[in-house]
Image (tube, grey):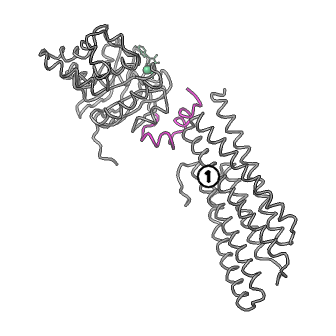
Amino acid sequence: MATRPKMDEELKEINKKVIEMAALIEETIRSSIKSLKEKDVELARKIIDGDEKIDDMEDEINSDCFKFLATQSPLAGDLRYCISIMKMIRDLERIGDHCEDLAKYTLRLESQEYYKELIDIPRMADMAARMVSNAIRAFVEKDLRMARKVWKSDEEVDELFRYIYEEQLDIAEKNTENARTAISFAFVAAHLERIADYATNICEETVFSLEGRYRMAL
Amino acid sequence: MNNKKTKFEIKDLDLYYGDFQALKKVGIDIYEREITALIGPSGCGKSTFLRTLNRMNDLIPGTRIKGQVKFDNKDIYDKDTDVIGLRKKVGMVFQKPNPFPKSIYDNITFGPRIHGIREKNRLDEITESTLKEVGLWNEVKDRLNKSALGLSGGQQQRLCIARCLAVEPEVLLMDEPTSALDPVATSRIEALLQDLAKKYTIVIVTHNMQQAGRVSGYTSFFLTGEIIETGLTEKIFSVPENKKTEEYISGRFG
Ligand SMILES: Nc1ncnc2c1ncn2[C@@H]1O[C@H](COP(=O)(O)OP(=O)(O)O)[C@@H](O)[C@H]1O
Ligand SMILES: [Mg+2]
């Protein structure tokens, strides 16, 4: 017996759109790394053009949530869920912006010779992308344990970032003709580090949605 | 945990109507000059509980009660309790505005007269101050001798609150006081409650979750005669501890 059919239906609809947006973000992260690694300029252009779609999705879900709050007056778990979604899609949108920036580096680096094959950056990208995917999965599946685990794994990304940053700095110092590329790679790593940070935000939203407090430590 | 003064301390309170147990081991502290909201589905015992606080259930034949209801540290069910005095201190406002079919003035002065106040000046004073307290003075000062039944629903309810205040109570019990009123009249009562809570302890039964959220500092959730959860209102409506509370305030049953 459904006592609140309209409310449940609207929640379901919002949830569906969030999952769609999340799927698009996951794909965008992977594409932006692929474009960089393979110097795929066409893919990069597609990512840059696609950012608008992500922005639109955020707007749409936001306005759905806003209407939901205004008409359904949710409380407790429903209220927390709605607030978390509004914050989470903002994080997703920002991740999208970082992907767009990464794609721009593909265009910028197109004419540059990579002085070595990209290994650590794709590794870091993979970690960040997986954090985002798992963070989203934890949110959707209401999996507190996974949320905490993902949140914790940010340390590894931070560490890798520091390593890559130092490495590129070193290359730039020793070899000025590679400085341009090295600095770009350092920036790419910085974008990836931010993406991983947003994944931890999503984990925090999951904990808030489920427990009503931002307490990450277990 | 907090340094609020407890006005009512209720422990292990059972109430029976004949064989039917309407309250089961109810326990709650009600703090002074706070608004405590009682929520829960119809028939869960909110009104029954409210009536135990000024012994209005004594008027219902076949009622039996067990447990403790301390008011200012004294059990009101002790044999030596002055029940008339208790009801003077603990007034009640009902769901449907129920002014007497008399003048506005007579409605207000009814209680004070019963309690022995006769001087016209004093009665006039009480009338003016209590009507001012409920924000009704300017609306009715020119028609004090007209029938209270000519007032709008919202005005009548404010008159009923003023009538309670006229005997200088300490506690106001309100049983769904706005459920018969339109939104504007409801807002006025809610604003009034905030004001009154500076001086009085208020216990209000409401079916409107948003109202409980807006006006009260504490909320207690009743279910089939038991208190399931009591806590700060902001906590109950954002992060309730009990699953039943969550289900009820989310409209999943009731
Ligand atoms: N005078 C009475 N005699 C017998 N049963 C009563 C009486 N008043 C209330 N009840 C029963 O006690 C239970 C609680 O009623 P009540 O306190 O009015 O609930 P609420 O105010 O939460 O709707 C209900 O099952 C109701 O039928
Ligand atoms: Mg009732």
| Numbered disc 1: secondary structure | helix
What residue is shown at x 44% (from left), y 39% (from top)?
B233
Find residue B248 and report its image quarter. top right
Q: Is residue B203 above or below residue B236?
A: above
Q: A34 or A158, which lies in front?
A: A34
Q: Which amino acid does label 1 sit on?
A: Lys
Q: Count the numbered circles shown.
A: 1
User: In this image, B179 relative to A184: left or right?
Assistant: left
Determine if residue A162 is in view.
yes
What residue is shown at x 40% (from left), y 38% (from top)?
B218
Q: Residue B29 appears at what percent x and percent y?
A: 34, 36
Q: Residue B177 appears at what percent x and percent y?
A: 40, 23
- Determine if the C-beta at disc 1 is less than 8 A from ligand 1: no
Q: Give yes or no for residue A135 being in the magenta stretch.
A: no
Determine if residue B21 is in view.
no
Magenta range is: B228-254
Q: Residue furthest left?
A: B119
Q: In this view, does B244 lie above or below B121?
A: below
Q: Mark 1 points at which residue?
A: A87
Q: Give yes or no for residue B249 being in the magenta stretch.
A: yes
Q: B246 or A69, which lies in front?
A: A69
Q: A159 or B160, which lies in front?
A: B160
Label 1: few (<14), some (14–19) or many (≥20) C-alpha neighbours in 10 Å: some
Find residue B251 and report its image quarter. top right
User: In this image, B196 relative to B123: left or right?
Assistant: right
Query: From the image, which quarter does the C terminus of chain B lie in?
Result: top right
What residue is shown at x 54% (from left), y 48% (from top)?
A212
Q: Ligand 1 is in which quadrant of the figure?
A: top left
Q: Which chain carries label 1?
A: A
Q: Residue A44 appears at what percent x and percent y?
A: 83, 65
Q: Residue B216 appears at what percent x and percent y?
A: 40, 36
